[in-house]
Amino acid sequence: MRYYPVNLNIKGRHCLVVGGGAVGTRKVVSLLECGARVSVISPEVTDRLNGLSNQGKIKLELRPFKESDLECVFLVIGATDDEILNRRIHGSAEKRGLLCNIADRPEICNFILPAVVRRGSLIISISTSGRSPAMAKKLRKDLELQFGQEYKVLLQLMGAIRQKLLSQAHAPEAHKPLFESLLNAGLIELVRDDRREEINRLLGDVLGMEFTYEALMESMDSDTDFSTT
């Protein structure tokens, strides 16, 4: 199987998880972290899912799944230990053209979920195309050691720089050599060690003296889209 890699925007989208055990709970938490509107259907659920329901963070229905539950759903995840039910969910989702993932059953999914390393806006996804989740987990742990929290700060800084450049009517195609200069000069190491004076000196040399770490980070808007190619 050759999968098409994609980063999916599910903010505000209605996502359904069928199954309320440990696996279903993990799926719900990851969906919430990405801003989805989450519903859970299962006769029994974990204490954490009950808590999320009581806090109004998810819609919870303690009952068996029925096909009509897929109406107005963008994405569905089957996380039950009932093979027949999982295949029913898959079949019903396929008829409706929905995105469907069945936990640990890549053969009845139209998308699979990678192992993920998150550092703020940095998302590193690892997939073995369903062949070895253990290998994906091992690679994720290795990458977590390689990419520390400094990458979260670096991307906040780079995003703020991009926002300021765009506000000054700089052509987007002119940004690439500026960012490459910053990175090639060791900006990530300076951020990792929190060497503010050297960061500001580098920013001034490459971008101009009006670019300072403190001012850029203060201007940072976490809701701004800084996506590039």
Image (cartoon, helix red, strand yellow):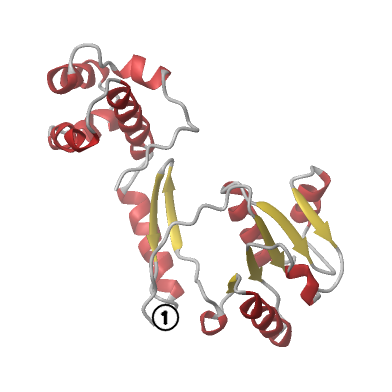
Towards the viewer: 128 or 166 = 166
Horizontal relation, residue 21 to residue 32: left or right: right
Q: Quadrant of residue 134?
A: bottom left
Q: Quadrant of residue 227?
A: top left
Q: In the image, residue 32 lies at what x, y percent?
A: 63, 49
Residue located at (79% from left, 72% from top) = 68
In the image, farthest residue toward the top: 209
Task: Give the total number of marks visible in the rendering.
Answer: 1
Q: In the image, residue 186 lies at what x, y percent?
A: 16, 33
Residue located at (48% from left, 31% from top) = 222
Residue located at (24% from left, 12% from top) = 210
Density class for disc 1 (Cα within 10 Å; few <14, some 14-19, many ≥20) is few
Residue matched to label 1: 131
For label 1, the SS is loop
Towards the viewer: 192 or 53 = 53
Q: In the image, residue 140 lies at what x, y percent?
A: 39, 60
Q: Quadrant of the N terminus?
A: bottom left
User: What amino acid is found at the position of numbered circle 1 in the picture?
Assistant: Arg
In the image, farthest residue toward the bottom: 84
